[in-house]
Image (cartoon, rainbow, N blue to C red):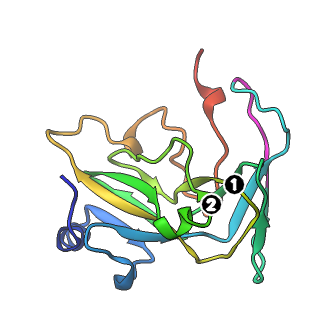
Amino acid sequence: MILSDKRILEEIEQGQILIEPFRRDCLGSNSYDVHLGRYLATYRDRVLDARVHNKIDYFEIPEEGIVLQPGTLYLGVTEEYTETHRHVPFLEGKSSTGRLGIDIHATAGKGDVGFCNTWTLEISVCQPVRVYVGMPVGQLIYFEVQGEIDMPYNKKKGAKYNVRTVKPMESMMWKNKF
């Protein structure tokens, strides 16, 4: 079941959902709009290796925006820091973003119960498009969980994305054993 606006507000009041900064006008009937943060990153190497720590270079989006180019994976970040202690958050792109040819995630649209961080965005574009800090890029939808949670993400020993950050995070696939 997807949480309604009233239910999201109740869960915020109870401390089960945290959104910083929270703006009431960003709350839809069953979702919360998130915005593009100040930092983007790109991988240094054109060929990535799943077994290697692929390094990234960070850069700030200037006031006049920045034109994203097709054929490059950009890692972005939400302005919003979120915590979810009893629900499963899903990040989806806004239709207005999609209509500009911007995809904000390739595969990582679901968070885990206990995810406490900003959201790294896997941004790709199908044609050149200028983006700006603070533009709405996605929306969070919260699902109820049936049953007790044994191990929330923020308590999981091997969780790779637990360090609070205002910058996008590169893939930590290299930490897996395969």
- Is 96 left, or right, of 114 in this rendering? right
Q: Position of residue 15 (x, y in %)?
A: 26, 66
Mark 1 lies on residue:
126
> Residue 23: horizontal and vertical position, in percent?
39, 82
Q: Are marks 1 and 2 in contact (CB under 8 Å)?
A: yes
Question: Can I make out residue 1 in this image?
Answer: yes
* Picture layout, residue 157 above or below residue 56: above
Viewer-proximal residue among 39 and 126: 126
Residue 11 location (% of width, % of height): 21, 66
Q: Amino acid at mark 2?
A: Gly
Point out the stretch of residues depicted in magenta. Answer: 51-57
Q: Image quadrant of residue 168?
A: bottom right
Task: Kindly identify which numbered label has been placed on residue 101.
Answer: 2
Q: Name the residue located 64 percent from the left edge and 39 percent from the top edge.
A: 171
The answer to which quarter of the image holds residue 46 is top right
Point 43% across, 55% down: residue: 91
Category of crowding for the residue at label 2, using alpha-carbon neighbours closer than 10 angstroms: few (below 14), some (14–19), many (at least 20): some
Viewer-side residue, 16 vs 155: 16
Mark 1 or 2, nearer chain start: 2
Task: Give the secondary structure at mark 1.
Answer: loop
Query: Relative to 175, is 110 above or below?
Result: below
Mark 1 to mark 2: distance in Å? 5 Å
x, y (%) of residue 83?
38, 59
Which amino acid type corresponds to the residue marked 1 in the rendered image?
A: Cys
What residue appears at the point 75 percent right and 27 percent down from the top-left corner?
49
Q: How many marks?
A: 2
The main secondary structure of the magenta stretch is loop
